[in-house]
Image: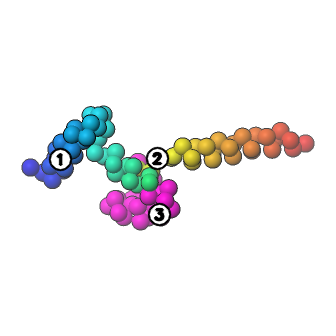
Amino acid sequence: MPVRRHYWDLYREVADAAGVPRTVWNLHARHGGATEAQQAGVDVADIAEHAQHTEINTTRKHYIVPSVETSRRVAKQRVAHRQAKRNTP
């Protein structure tokens, strides 16, 4: 049995026992780990190397998901920028 399939079967067995819904895949753990590492301040190059990605953009594009906090910061900056434009003569 290929290692990849073995890991999937093992993950699913543990996930089923823990009550994890079947819509949650083992790959979500990799994504969550990369996102958590980025939020903890780990350099994206180190995250990519840890995930064994040859391209950092793979890590950035497919593995690091913006957090709610990131979205809030972006939204605040956008609102502040709009308000500053309105107040400029």
Residue under label 1: 10
Sort mark 3 into few (<14), some (14-19) or many (20+) by Cα contacts within 10 Å: few
Sort mark 2 into few (<14), some (14-19) or many (20+) by Cα contacts within 10 Å: some
Magenta span includes 52: yes
Instruction: Please name the amino acid that badge 1 sits on.
Output: Leu
Q: Earlier in the sequence, mark 1 or mark 3?
A: 1
Q: Is residue 11 left or right of residue 84?
A: left
Secondary structure, mark 1, is helix
Residue in the image at 44% along x and 64% along y: 45
Residue found at the far left of this picture:
1
Query: Relative to residue 4, is residue 25 depicted above or below?
Result: above
Q: Is the magenta stretch mostly helix, strand or loop?
A: helix
Secondary structure, mark 2, is loop
Residue under label 3: 42
Magenta span includes 63: no
- Tell me how the rendering is colored: rainbow
Mark nearer the viewer, 2 or 1 = 1
Say which of 16 and 65 sits in front.
16
Residue in the image at 34% along x and 51% along y: 30
Residue under label 2: 65
The image shows residue 59 at horizontal and vertical percentages of: 41, 54
Instruction: Please name the amino acid that badge 2 sits on.
Output: Val
Mark nearer the viewer, 1 or 3 = 1
Query: Relative to residue 50, is residue 77 depicted above or below?
Result: above
Q: Is residue 28 left or right of residue 8?
A: right
Q: Earlier in the sequence, mark 2 or mark 3?
A: 3
The image shows residue 85 at horizontal and vertical percentages of: 81, 42
- Find the magenta span and give its range: 37-62
How many numbered tags mark residues here? 3
Secondary structure, mark 3, is loop
Residue in the image at 50% along x and 56% along y: 39
The image shows residue 57 at horizontal and vertical percentages of: 44, 55
